[in-house]
Every structure is written in structure tokens, then in C-alpha cells.
Image (tube, rainbow, N blue to C red):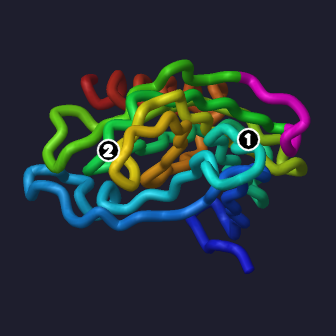
Amino acid sequence: MGLVTDLGVLDISFTGVVGSVLDDRDRGALAATQPLSDLLRDFAFISEDLNAPIPADGVMDITIEGLDAGDYEFKGYFHDRSVDHVSGDVAVSTDGGGTFAQVVDNGLYSFDTDPPVIGTASFYFTSNGVDPVVVKLTGQEGFFFLSGTFRDQDTALISGFEITQVPEPGTLALALLASAAFVARWRR
């Protein structure tokens, strides 16, 4: 069953690789001054399973199926109120995961209950209307205090995301021309 959105019905799934753990957290509300407090209190994450025979890097794939052909903007929010995950990379595939293009290198995450800036990353992509779009999040190496000791663990996380359809350049240019003509006629 898909998620009903302004873009139609989309199927969205989160996956990881063997040797990693996919989970979620609710760290509680942020400061009242944060306009995205409800969104940023929760996040999905994937990290190395330190108990696995071969721990895997913290890599999370978000697969989006059902997008019509067209141009889109993806805007992700990356925040953990309690732990500084430092940074992560984002890559996108528009052919169902066959090939990826890195779109964000070392994007900053935010942390704390009242961060001065929220960790975000935006990029544009084109859907062919047939193949799923896959957004790959890769956490960077970082030391975390777990179970009374510091451990080296890769973690990728996301608090939420928005996908908006972008008008084609021709449509946008036509709208600008129509607006200019309207203004010119109104001034007469």
C-alpha cells in the first residue's frame, strides 16, 4: 500500500545492508524556538551492527517508487538532538539503484535541543516515470559513547524529507512572460 501525497501514491521504503541495523528514535521535543521541532524530534537511522561477524558501514537506501516523469527537488532534514553525527554523504540513482551520482559530500548534521542551523541537504533529480529513485545516505566515521565506552561507528540518519516537483524551464519561462505581459498591460 502506498503513501498518498500531492505527487500521487508513492511507495517509500528504507533498507540497509547485511551487517547493519536499521532503527528509529524519538529523542523528544526540541526548544520551542525551533519551527520544525515535531519533525526533528524523530529520525530513522542505520549503523554498523557491532555484534555482526562483519559489521557494515552505516548506509541507508530510501527507495521512492511511483513518481511521474519530471524534475524534482529532494530536501532532507538531518538532526539528532543528543548525538553529534558530524556529517554524511548523499547519492541519488534515477535508474532503480543501478548507478549513483553523489550529490552531497560531507553534508552537516545538526544536534542539540536548539541548534542555530538545522542540518539540511537539497538536490535536484529527474525521474523517468518508470524506474524507482533511490537516495543513498552514507554516515561518516565517528566516535560514539555506547554502553560505557567509546566506539568507532558509522551512522546515517534522516529526520524527514520533502519531494517537490519543479516546473520545466519552458513552463517557468512562459509563466514569467505572461506575468511581464500582465504587468505591462496593467501599467498602461
Chain part drawn in magenta: 95-101
The residue most toward the top is 105
78 relative to 161 in the view: left or right? left
Task: Locate residue 104 relative to residue 33 in the image: left or right.
Answer: right
Q: How crowded is mark 1: few (under 14 residues within 10 Å), some or many (20 or more)?
A: some
Q: Is residue 96 magenta?
A: yes
Expressed as whole percent of the image width and height from the top left, the position of residue 83 reads 32, 44
User: Does any portion of residue 178 appear in the rendered image?
Assistant: no
- Mark 2 / mark 1, whichever is N-terminal: 1
Instruction: Count the labels in the image.
Output: 2
- Circle 1: residue type: Gly
Q: Nearer the viewer, residue 68 or 45?
A: 45
Q: How far apart are marks 2 and 1 (CA)?
A: 37 Å
Q: Name the residue under label 2.
A: 83
Find residue 131 and report its horizontal and vertical position in percent. Answer: 88, 48
Classify the position of the N terminus by image quarter: bottom right
Q: Taking 65 as reference, is 17 above or below it?
A: above
Q: Residue at x 56, y 48 (%)?
A: 163
Residue 162 in view here:
yes
Secondary-structure class at tag 2: loop
Q: Among all residues in the image, which is located at the extreme bottom?
A: 1
Disc nearest the viewer among 2 and 1 = 2
| Amino acid marked by disc 2 | Val
Badge 2 density bin: few <14, some 14–19, many ≥20, Cα 10 Å: few
Vertically, is 185 above or below 154? above
Which residue is the site of mark 1?
70
Magenta-colored segment: predominant secondary structure: loop
Which quadrant holds the C terminus? top left
Which residue is drawn at the image coordinates 55% and 19% (left, top)?
105
Instruction: From the top left corner, tell me how far across and down residue 148 is, in percent.
Output: 33, 51
Q: Classify mark 1: helix, strand or loop.
A: strand
Question: Which label number is shown at residue 91?
Answer: none
